[in-house]
Image: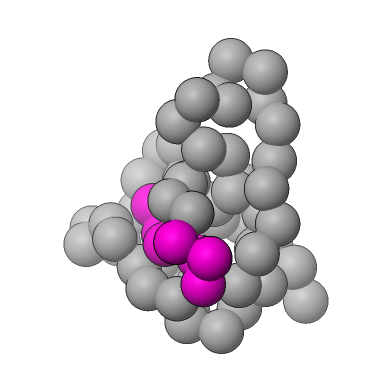
């Protein structure tokens, strides 16, 4: 599912995010959303979230 819409993401969801330092390489990190950091309903690069392990990144994919 698309990670650019806030309505698609909620705490507890399993997602793949790209961290700031991995943006060039495109390396994705998998984890569970702890909280949403982006307040706007959409963001072209993905909604920014904090994962349960304190990793911060933008959601590229929501896993089901």
Quarter containing the C terminus: bottom right
Q: Nearer the viewer, residue 13 or 53?
A: 53
Q: Is residue 4 visible?
A: no
- Quadrant assignment, res 14: bottom right
User: Residue 61 placed where, x, y %?
Assistant: 67, 54
Q: Residue at x 69, y 41 (%)?
A: 28
Q: Nearer the viewer, residue 30 or 61?
A: 30
In the rendered image, residue 59 lying in the magenta stretch gets the answer no
Q: Residue at x 65, y 64 (%)?
A: 31
Q: Is residue 37 visible?
A: yes
- Quadrant assignment, res 42: bottom left
In the displayed structure, 42 sits above or below 12; it is above
Residue 23 as seen in the image, left or right of residue 39: right
Quarter containing the N terminus: bottom right
Q: Residue at x 21, y 62 (%)?
A: 39
Chain part drawn in magenta: 47-54
Q: Nearer the viewer, residue 52 or 16?
A: 52
In the displayed structure, 58 sits above or below 7; it is above
User: Residue 47 placed where, x, y %?
Assistant: 41, 53
Q: Residue at x 57, y 39 (%)?
A: 18
Residue 63 as seen in the image, left or right of residue 49: right
């Amino acid at each position: 599912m698309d990670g650019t819409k806030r309505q698609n993401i909620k705490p507890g969801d399993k997602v793949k995010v790209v961290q700031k330092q991995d943006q060039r390489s495109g390396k994705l990190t998998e984890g569970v959303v702890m909280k949403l950091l982006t307040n706007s309903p959409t963001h072209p690069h993905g909604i920014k979230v904090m994962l349960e392990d304190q990793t911060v990144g933008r959601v590229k994919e929501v896993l089901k």
